[in-house]
Image: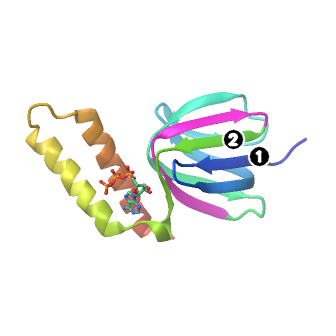
Amino acid sequence: MSTSLKLTIITPERKLYDGEIKSINTETTEGHIGILPKHAPIIANLKPTVTVIKDNKGEVKRLFTSSGLMKVEEDNIIVLCDASEWKEEIDFNRAEKAKERAENRLKNREEGLDVNRAEIALCRALVRLKFKDLL
Ligand code: ATP
């Protein structure tokens, strides 16, 4: 029985991950999901979150993944997302400013505001800021 999965994480700009893993935990619009070998085939919508990967050596890696899609089929996982960063790549000042902008938009509720867009922008910023406290 296969004990590993092949994971590829791609953004419009680059390939963040390409390798064999033991598991991945991430968040879909329906809730948290963990994928192990032999998972049923799925396509899921991803929410901005802290995605946790256990690599083949058992090492745990965490990275920010934004909105996107995940396809799982025959132990192959493809994550296509709008943006993704490792902790050391995250600019926390930028995320703090993005958080304030989104919070102000949601507070002021100016006419024509795309509430869903502002809420997702706030979610991206809050998840990026979570990495401050993660090892
Ligand atoms: P901002 O309003 O600051 O652009 P955003 O959440 O709208 O934030 P995204 O659309 O998620 O930004 O990402 C656009 C690009 O900028 C991607 O390449 C992403 O990796 C990068 N990026 C966005 N915010 C940060 C950040 N705080 N630190 C590092 N890279 C970031």
> The residue under label 2 is which amino acid type?
Ile
Q: Nearer the viewer, residue 9 or 107?
A: 9
- The quarter of the displayed image where residue 92 is located: bottom left
Give the overall secondary structure of the magenta segment: strand
Give the quadrant of the N terminus. Answer: top right
The numbered disc on residue 16 is: none
> Which color scheme did the rendering employ for the protein?
rainbow
Marks 1 and 2 close (CB-CB < 8 Å) = yes
Range drawn in magenta: 60-74
Q: Where is residue 117 in the image (x, y as percent from the top left)?
A: 29, 38
Residue bearing the label numbered 2:
77
> Which residue corresponds to the image point at 52% horizontal and 53% vertical from the top-left?
13
Q: In this view, does 46 lie to the left or right of 128?
A: right
Q: Is residue 10 left or right of residue 2?
A: left
The residues tagged by marks 1 and 2 sit, at their Cα atoms, a distance apart of 7 Å
| Residue positioned most to the front | 13
Task: Work out whether residue 71 can be spotted.
Answer: yes
> Which residue corresponds to the image point at 84% horizontal and 47% vertical from the top-left?
3
Residue 101 painted magenta: no
Q: Where is residue 98 in the image (x, y as percent from the top left)?
A: 26, 56
> The residue under label 1 is which amino acid type?
Leu
Q: Position of residue 96 (x, y in %)?
A: 27, 62
What is the secondary structure assignment of the residue under circle 1?
Answer: strand
> Which residue corresponds to the image point at 73% horizontal and 43% vertical from the top-left?
36
The numbered disc on residue 5 is: 1
Task: Work out whether residue 134 can be spotted.
Answer: no
Q: In this view, does 94 lie to the left or right of 13?
A: left
